[in-house]
Structure formats: structure tokens, C-alpha cells
Image (spheres, rainbow, N blue to C red):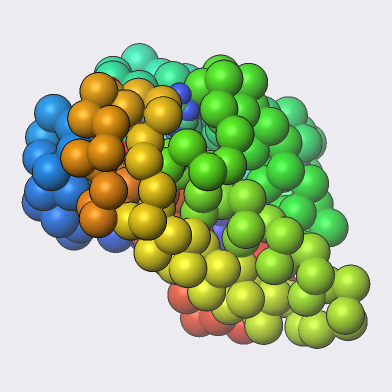
Amino acid sequence: MSNKAVAAIEVIGEAIIFNKDFLTSLDTAIGDSDHGINMARGFEAVSGKLRTLPEETDIGTVLKTVAMTLISTVGGAAGPLYGTAFLRASAVAAGKQEVDASLAAAALAAAIQGIRERGKATTGEKTMLDALEPALAAFNEGLAAGKPVLECLDLAVAAAEKGVEYTKTIVATKGRASYLGERSLGHQDPGATSATIILKTLADYCRQQQMGVM
Ligand code: ADP
Ligand code: MG
């Protein structure tokens, strides 16, 4: 039900706001010290917007509201990228009141494709894609192996966390961190980290709900 979608986004926003300083410190190392500030500002605005939606709002509309709010409030690279991701996911979830595993996988795939296109990026460039792409692959592998959806979400989170570790070992070739060249080595990517926080919070929320994905 859409009010569960709103609740899920609310807890994701709380996690981002909780990690504001951490995300900003990561961006201080290889960017311009604003990733946590940008994301927290965006999710604070999202929270306000979601409260204005009617109870029965479908998940697509909830995600579209998130997208439009992030695009208009986050700024920097992350605003348009996360905005595009949520917008593409919203199209997949249009009219839905429930999300099952295959819809979740399709929404994440669409979100990733949106980031790839908008950011003209691929994996191995030290961006949020280095967390999200392995997460989707692990989620799909788990589903294909017949594992329960909560276990698949855990696999996705573990893959995203591994992806964040991987970003420490590669040079950034997209975004501000790319200006640093080799000096970006050894630092984890802020966007990969925020993407992992989002996935982990969603997985934790779903476990709490104990009823599928949303
Ligand atoms: P800005 O870099 O404009 O200050 P943020 O600090 O909010 O924006 O976000 C930086 C994050 O955005 C990076 O850590 C990276 O994950 C992501 N990012 C930047 N450029 C791209 C891109 N072209 N494609 C995908 N992700 C990108
Ligand atoms: Mg920045």
C-alpha cells in the first residue's frame, strides 16, 4: 500500500539525514563537501511533500513526488541523478499499490539505467553505480536461485557494501572526484555510500514489515 511506500521513504530520509555529516566528510575528501548537505536537504523536502499526499496515493506517484522534489532541492550532481533514478522507478511502479520482488527488481533496473544515461556513466568509474549495479545483480541472482525476497535484499545490500569498498580501489572518472585523478584512490565514493544507505534502510524496513518488499 502506498502509505507503506511513504513510510519506507520516510525512514530512508531519516537515515540520510542521520548520515549527513558522514556523507559530507566523504565528499570533503574527494569532492566539494556537500553530498550529505545536499541529500539531507532533499530528503527533508521530500518528507514535507509526502505528508501532503492522500493516503491512497499509488507507489508510482509517491516515487514521482520523491523524484521531482529531489530534482528541485538537492542540486549538484546527485540531485538530477537520484531524481532521474526515482523518476524511472516511478514509471515502473505507476498505478501500483504493492511492490513484489520482480517489480522491485524492474524498478531498480530502470533507476540504474536512468543514472547511466543521465550521468553518462558506467561501472568502474567510482560512482553510485558501483554500489547499485552489483546490488541489482545480487538481488536477481538470489531471486533466480529461489531465495526469499528478504534474503535477496540482504544479498543486494552486501553486494552494495562490497561495491563501496571497491570504489576505494579505483580512480574516479566521472563527477568532481575525477578532477583529482590518482588522488581519488583510497577514498570511498560518497554517492555509492548514500546509495548503499538507501538500500540498507529499505532492506531493514522490509524486514520490520515482514511482508515482502513494501
Ligand atoms: P557534486 O559532485 O555536484 O558536488 P554531490 O556531492 O551531491 O554532487 O554528489 C557526488 C556523487 O555523485 C559522487 O560521489 C558520485 O557517486 C555521483 N556522481 C557524480 N557524477 C556522476 C555521474 N556522471 N554519473 C553517476 N554518478 C555520478
Ligand atoms: Mg559534492
Q: Where is residue 4 in the image (x, y as percent from the top left)?
A: 56, 58
Q: In this view, does 174 lie above or below 7?
A: above
In this view, which residue lies farthest toward the front? 182
Q: Residue 57, can we see it?
A: no
Displayed-image quarter of ligand 1: top left
Residue 88 visible, this orientation: yes
Label tally: 0
Compared across the picture, whether 22 is left or right of 99 comes to left
Residue at the image position 70 percent from the left and 67 percent from the top? 138
Q: Where is residue 113 in the image (x, y as percent from the top left)?
A: 68, 32
| Image: 207 above or below 71 | below
Residue 171: where, in percent of width, then height? 36, 41
Q: Which residue is drawn at the image coordinates 80% and 70% (left, top)?
A: 141
In front: 163, or 111?
A: 163
- Quarter of the C terminus within the rendering: bottom right
Which one is in front, 25 or 180?
Answer: 180
Up/down of 118 relative to 209, above or below: above
Placement of the N terminus among the 4 image quadrants? bottom right
Left or right: where 190 falls relative to 79: left
User: Which quadrant of the structure image shows residue 181?
Assistant: top left
Q: Which residue is drawn at 29% across and 59% down?
A: 15
What x and y, as percent, mark residue 188? Answer: 29, 54
Q: In this view of the protein, which residue sits in the foreground, 170 or 212?
A: 170
Asked if 169 appears above or below 56 in the picture, the reply is below
Image point 20% across, 57% down: which residue?
19
Q: Quadrant of the rendered structure where residue 80 is?
A: top left
